[in-house]
Amino acid sequence: MKKVLAAAALVLAATALPLLAHDAWVDPLGGPIYQVFYGHKVPENYPAAKVTTLQVLDAEQHFLPYTRLPTAKGLSIKPTGQPAMFVLDFDNGYWTKTLQDKESRNVRLTAQPAAAGGVGSRLFKYSKTVLRWQPWMFKAVGQRFEFVPEAFSGALRAGQPFQVRLLLDGQPLANAMVENNSNEEGPHTDANGLVTIKLVKGINRLANDLDIAQTADPDATRLSLTAALVFVAE
């Protein structure tokens, strides 16, 4: 599901880091306390400090105050008022895989004695969870990597086609595969970053992972970004 951007060209990653496919999102079925999940097919534990930015917006796009509730599993939050959307930034730090490693590890590349030929990634995850759809949600909220749904009317139901646009730094991202609920398959965005997804009953968690090759950071050979859009269909 990953793609790597090198300058203006697209190139394939030479070494896979499985944890790049993990997302971070707010559970849309919570309330009055909502849990922030992190994981791929199954949620995993994580340090609550990795949730670096969290905005809670009501139906009028006003910011709502909330209380952070760190737990052994990660972070839960208790908003004041009626939330309509959660906007989340999650800093997953550095992950490294050397030629001697079977799996990637949450360490810096330069901290490894046998890092030659290894791959290091700096991971950031962005997500939006929608509880109550409003017209302003059909526009970007300003995340570096984000899904922006196309306008629709009526209730969302299973089997219904649903269009979203994927933006990187505010610009459409073409030929990006969009999965739903970590199914590891899905359609690709067109030249305008637009893709049509068939909805499933219950939670829909649309996601894409993007790797950007870089040389400025000695601890990372690539910047790894994840975008997710989460909502419920009937």
Image (spheres, grey):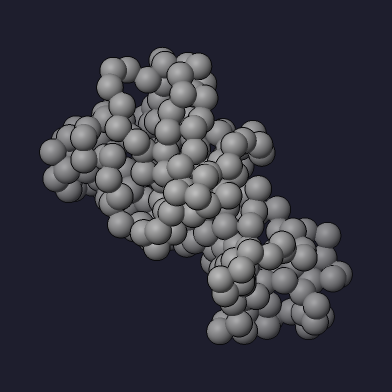
Camera sees residue 39: no
Residue 102: percent from left, percent from top? 83, 60
Camera sees residue 20: yes
Query: What residue is rendered at 79% in x and 71% in y?
Result: 98
Judging depth in this view, the residue of 140 and 20 nearest the camera is 140
Above/below status of 112 relative to 167:
below
Q: Is residue 191 left or right of residue 151?
A: right
Above/below status of 109 relative to 172:
below
Residue 191: percent from left, percent from top? 50, 50
Q: Is residue 118 left or right of residue 58?
A: right
Residue 56: percent from left, percent from top? 25, 45
Judging depth in this view, the residue of 25 and 9 nearest the camera is 9
Above/below status of 192 relative to 204:
below
Find residue 215 and report its image quarter. Answer: bottom right
Find residue 26 and report its image quarter. Answer: top left
Above/below status of 4 relative to 119:
above
Query: What residue is rendered at 74% in x and 59% in y?
Result: 16
Residue 203: percent from left, percent from top? 47, 26
Query: What residue is rendered at 53% in x and 44% in y?
Result: 189
Badge count = 0
Query: What residue is rendered at 31% in x and 27% in y?
Result: 152
